Amino acid sequence: MMLLPTPSLPLLTGLASAILATVIAGMLALAAAAMVRRWHHDRFDCWVESLRLHYAPTSATLLEGNHSAQWLESLRPLPISTLELLLEPLLLECASSPALAAVLDELCLGLGLIDVWERRILGLFGLVSLREAVSYPEGLLFFLPGLRFLLRARGARNMGLLRHGASWPILVKALDDPHPDVQQAALLSLAAIQQPGSFLALLERMHKSLTGNRQPLSLHSVKAAMAKFPFSQAPHLLLSLRDPNPRVRAAALEILREMAKSELARKPTHFQYKRAFDSELAALTSDADAEVRVLAGEVIECLEVALTSSVLRQMLQDAQWSVRSGALQTLAQRPVLLPMDEVRSFLADPHQMVRQAALRALPAYGREGVSKLYEHFLETEDEYLREEILEELEHSGRLLSLLQEYGESPGNLATRVVERLLTMGATTHLHSALSSSSGRQLLQILFGKPEGHSKPKIEAWVRLCTALGATHELDTADGRTKPAA
């Protein structure tokens, strides 16, 4: 066996010195590079700031129309990269200012920026010199094909910020870009521009996604973008509502629901085109697919679709609790469609959300509906339902109305309900109602001027306050805290 020679001490010392010198040289080089980069960055920031002080207008100046033709001509000789740096802050302000977007769109069109951005979205990049590329941070992207998607995505984003309507065909093409960032930027811009032609293009993509053809964009993002379009585009969904594929029908209903909610938020009194969906939505309430029926009920609630009593009864008998709940919510807005007794029966529905919807629908029938609610509270043996009724009375503010009628006559409904609460020991709701500002005002009216009320009413209230005070003392002794009357 041959033994390797042992390195001498001078050789090891020299090797260690060489490694140490290399490490120190590397650290010094990194420090120098960082200092040069910081110097270049500070110099670039000063240059950009001086440019903006000299050339760039403020958003207020643009909105007031105070920019002159001479100022516009002074911008034309500047390189495209410089113009982009100058206008970037104003572009970002356009997201919340449509008026500024309109002015800036005209300005960018005159300076040729729109044309440059559209060509970049399509992957057409002009020649850029190395000197120009290194003059600003993003210039080197032109020489790195793998990172050019950043320029394409920024171009697509700018079209949306400016709401440049003529660019929508190019943005539709960008939905097929190989990079997902560009696809998403183009989709968001289409939703911001809201051109009718782009809605049809997105609708076609939605159909392809739902019928098995793989698409680069997710179905959820396409539906979200379509939902941002104005309701005037909603009639294009009618064919989708009749599609034999239940997934297509469901997706169309989701978009229709969100469009209706947005339109109602902007114009709560009236909006056009909703009558076009009456027959389609009425038919979808009996769809074979449960999800479609549920979504149809939600859309009906938003659009106030003209329904017949038979259609509403069919919804109330649906196996899906959300369909029944939606029908009761519709009745809360339009109680004339069905008699009150048909609503009352749903207070015993097995699903909590349906019961709550029935509780909210009954008061829509006026004083008679509220009386039926009181009667059901007195008649039912279901403790859980009684608690639900009390919570609804408190939430809707009707518990205070109940107390105002308390003691008017020994046998009236209000008196019986309050006395039942005292018998049950369920005084929490009464404490809460009387501790509010309106409740304290009611007590002041009753006991401040007792001569203005009948003797039986005052006596009933004295008994009530005594009972509530005793209950409060017991609760405090047990370590519980409840508001005192």
Image (spheres, rainbow, N blue to C red):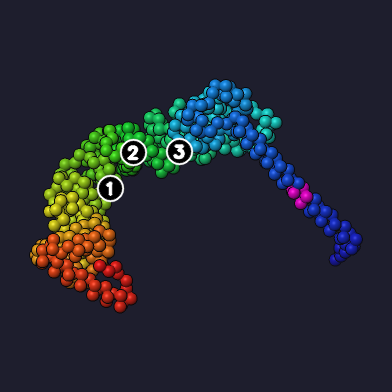
Q: Specify the segment rendered in magenta.
A: 27-31
Q: Which residue is mark 1?
A: 294
Amino acid at dot 2: Arg
For label 2, the SS is helix
Residue at 37% from the left image edge and 39% from the top image edge: 227
Q: Foreground mark, 2 or 1?
A: 2
Tag 2: Cα neighbours inside 10 Å, few (<14), some, or many (≥20)? few
Q: Which mark is residue 349?
A: none
Residue at 21% from the left image edge and 46% from the top image edge: 333
For label 1, the SS is helix
Amino acid at dot 3: Ser
Could you tell which of marks 2 and 1 lies nearer the N-terminus?
A: 2
Q: Which residue is mark 2?
A: 266
Depth order, front residue of 285/268 = 268
Quadrant hosting residue 352 = bottom left
Distance (Cα) linking label 2 and label 1: 25 Å
Instruction: Look at the picture and state if 243 lies above or below 71.
Output: below
Residue 473 visible somewhere in the drawing: yes
Tag 1: Cα neighbours inside 10 Å, few (<14), some, or many (≥20)? many
Depth order, front residue of 437/359 = 437
Please indicate whether residue 87 sits to the left or right of residue 482 in the image: right
Distance (Cα) linking label 2 and label 3: 16 Å
Check the image and name the residue furthest to the bottom: 477
Q: Which residue is mark 3?
A: 96
